Image: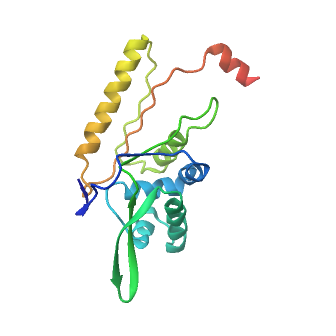
Amino acid sequence: MTIAGMPTDDLPETLRVSTDEQLRAVSNLTRHRIMAVLRFEPATITQIAERVGLAKGSSSYHVRLLERAGLVKVVRTRKVRGVTERYYAMAARSIVLPDPGEGGPDVLMRHAVADLEASPVDGERQVRMAHLRLTEEQFAQLAARLHALADEYRELSDPSLPDASLVFALFHPASRAQAEGDAK
């Protein structure tokens, strides 16, 4: 596998976020968006700033925090008019976040909602919520199918095509008694 013509065979398949520094780094929406830019191809600070809509200084600051946390790394450098230009990429093909504690915020869902709210209103969006009643076996089967489908389309992703985000959440909601207790 290559990222924009660069070999990525040395990239680990997964990086599990485990330290407080890593959790703080991925909890920030701007850094989440920077990692999305780097997901398919390396980019310089200038390219990242343009794609995320940041000033170069802000982009550099956020990339340094991600690099210090071990989530992104320099994959190539080149001299341009006497200045060393660094190309950054994700440190692994996928990042795995720990499950939030009970009642804790789910970072991925917060970022997904923010990205959805920021997406163009006139753009194509597919949003659906379905309430289901499933056996534990059906629940597990559906989860496996959703993961397989997401993996299948991730493999088909082409960096030259426009970005698309897929987010799904399959969960057992809090019981009515539990929800009423939280509301008091």
**Which residue appears at 37% of the width and 45% of the height?**
165
Query: Which quadrant holds residue 142?
Result: top left
In this image, 5 relative to 134: left or right?
left
Please tell me which residue lies in front, 38 or 98.
98
Q: Residue furthest top?
A: 135
Residue 184 position, x and y percent, is 77, 23
**Which residue appears at 55% of the width and 51% of the height?**
22
**Which residue appears at 42% of the width and 66% of the height?**
48
Q: Residue furthest front?
A: 10
Q: Residue furthest right?
A: 184
Would you place residue 19 above or below residue 53 in this image? above
In this image, 13 relative to 65: left or right?
left
Query: Colour scheme used in the picture?
Result: rainbow
Query: Which quadrant holds residue 170?
Result: top left
Would you place residue 73 above or below residue 80 in this image? above
**Which residue appears at 34% of the width and 25% of the height?**
144
Please tell me which residue lies in front, 101 or 111.
101
Would you place residue 89 above or below residue 93 in this image? below
Residue 106 position, x and y percent, is 56, 38
Q: Residue furthest bottom?
A: 82
